Image: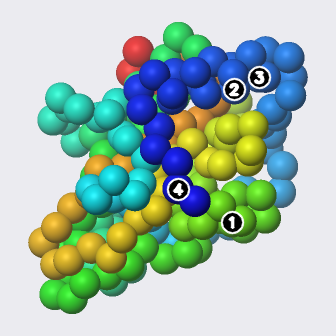
Amino acid sequence: MSIRFTKARRGMVAMTVAAGLALGVAGCGSGGGEDKKPETSASASKSGRGSDPSAQEGTDELLAELKGEDGLILSITSAQRDAGGFVTVSGELKNDGDEAARVSARTSGDETEIIRHGTSLGGATLVDSASKKRYYVLRDTDGRPLTTTGMPRIKPGDSIPVFMQFPAPPNSSNEVSFQLPTFASATITISG
């Protein structure tokens, strides 16, 4: 079952997550796996099967371009700090190859709770070197990652919008390393 997050619903989920963070329910740490290299890639669906990455609308600036498997390229156009205590990373996933490509299941990461909800960008992380912390994709109360889900096979030359939401690093940390399994990592700047 795929769930579409409208702006209002994402806002409600974000507020719920922010409240949970304030209560110490969700933790971010420098726990295991920090030396792991990204394994996979992921994207959002234009067909309505994926989540709505409306946070990226109206952005033209390219923060980073990450190459992945099978000709997939992830272009990050926005990393926006929101008042609710989270960061939304948005962009698009393009198939620059000659054949249709499917986003690898490895982009979902290796956490059982996220994997059971299907292919997503749930394996994405932000690493704040200054505070030595790794931030994982947020989840709703049912364990679904707050990222693009239900990604289709992407035809050559086509692209699909994508988004991911993370707990916000401290306001003093504006530069973080973005990592997604099967893609190269890149340093991005958080605005807002």
Count residues near mark 2 (Cα–Cα under 10 Å), then give few for <14, some for 14-19, many for 20+. Answer: many
Q: Which residue is mark 1?
A: 115
Q: Residue at x 53, y 37 (%)?
A: 165
Mark 1 or mark 3: whose residue is earlier in sequence = 3
Point out the frontmost of discs 2 and 3: 2
Q: CA distance from mark 2 to mark 4?
A: 20 Å
Mark 2 or mark 4: whose residue is earlier in sequence = 4
Q: Amino acid at mark 4?
A: Ser
Q: Amino acid at mark 3?
A: Leu
Point out the frontmost of discs 4 and 1: 4
Determine which of the numbered discs, if any, sits on residue 2 in the image: 4
Q: Are marks 2 and 3 in contact (CB under 8 Å)?
A: yes
Q: CA distance from mark 2 to mark 1?
A: 19 Å
Q: CA distance from mark 1 to mark 3?
A: 22 Å
Q: Secondary structure at mark 2?
A: helix
Q: Residue at x 58, y 14 (%)?
A: 84
Q: Are marks 2 and 1 in contact (CB under 8 Å)?
A: no
Q: Are marks 4 and 3 in contact (CB under 8 Å)?
A: no
Q: Answer above or below: position of 119 versus 179.
A: below
